[in-house]
Image (cartoon, rainbow, N blue to C red):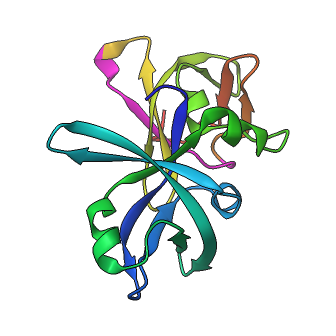
């Protein structure tokens, strides 16, 4: 589905009223959800459903989302494991001036502090701690370079110039 991005994943249910326990990457985006798309596999392929967000609460490291159309555990269970999507334009509108979508990092050139080219960001993996930049170096025999996406290690991200600066740390580059 073009033009949509994932903002979370339904991990389980919470209580008996069909409230979804959702893992998410950006609390601000999740707190503003109104309508979401959910891809769901069925016998005939992938269905795209639109659900209306009735309420969002945060508990520990999860969002508890009540959808207007879902009122029981049985109604929620078919969605367990499904990603929640919103329109990409909607997500970009919610960003502050110095914020960007993680997927916008893919394809950016990575440089060190001395402006020496390291490689191109080929992927961004999400982990429980930090997102990980996967950089494909010019010399592919070196293998993929993995850099935790933290401000201390990646102090500059310039989407317009298609560039990130990575602070070299021994053993990292």
Residue reaching furthest to the left: 43
Number of numbered discs: 0
Q: Nearer the viewer, residue 39 or 101?
A: 39
Picture quarter containing residue 71? bottom left
Q: Residue at x 59, y 29 (%)?
A: 105
Q: Nearer the viewer, residue 39 or 144?
A: 39
The answer to whether 20 is drawn above or below residue 147 in the figure is below
Q: Residue at x 20, y 46 (%)?
A: 42
The answer to whether 148 is drawn above or below residue 18 in the figure is above
Picture quarter containing residue 123? top left
Q: Position of residue 173 (x, y in %)?
A: 48, 32
Residue reaching furthest to the right: 97
Residue reaching furthest to the bottom: 15
Q: Nearer the viewer, residue 110 or 56?
A: 56
Residue reaching furthest to the top: 138
Is 71 on the left or on the right of 109, as rendered? Answer: left
Q: Residue at x 37, y 79 (%)?
A: 72
The answer to whether 143 is drawn above or below residue 40 in the figure is above
Q: Position of residue 78 (x, y in %)?
A: 27, 62
Is 112 on the left or on the right of 40, as rendered? Answer: right
Q: Nearer the viewer, residue 70 or 25?
A: 70
The answer to whether 40 is drawn above or below residue 143 in the figure is below
Q: Position of residue 119 (x, y in %)?
A: 50, 18
Q: Residue at x 81, y 40 (%)?
A: 98
Magenta span: 141-152
Quarter of the N terminus within the rendering: top left
Q: Does the magenta run of residues contain 8?
A: no
């Amino acid at each position: 589905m073009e033009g949509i991005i994932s903002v979370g994943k339904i991990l389980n249910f919470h209580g008996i009223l069909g409230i979804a326990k959702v893992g998410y990457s950006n609390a601000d985006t999740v707190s503003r959800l109104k309508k979401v798309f959910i891809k769901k596999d069925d016998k005939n392929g992938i269905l795209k459903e639109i659900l209306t967000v009735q309420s969002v609460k945060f508990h520990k490291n999860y969002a508890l989302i009540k959808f207007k159309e879902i009122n029981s555990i049985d109604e929620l269970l078919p969605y367990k494991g499904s990603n929640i999507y919103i329109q990409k334009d909607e997500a970009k509108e919610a960003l502050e001036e110095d914020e960007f979508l993680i997927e916008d990092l893919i394809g950016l050139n990575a440089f060190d502090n001395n402006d020496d080219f390291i490689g191109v960001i080929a992927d961004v993996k999400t982990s429980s701690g930090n997102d990980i930049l996967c950089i494909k170096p010019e010399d592919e025999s070196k293998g993929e370079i993995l850099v935790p996406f933290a401000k201390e290690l990646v102090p500059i991200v310039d989407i317009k110039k298609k560039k990130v600066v990575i602070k070299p740390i021994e053993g990292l580059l």
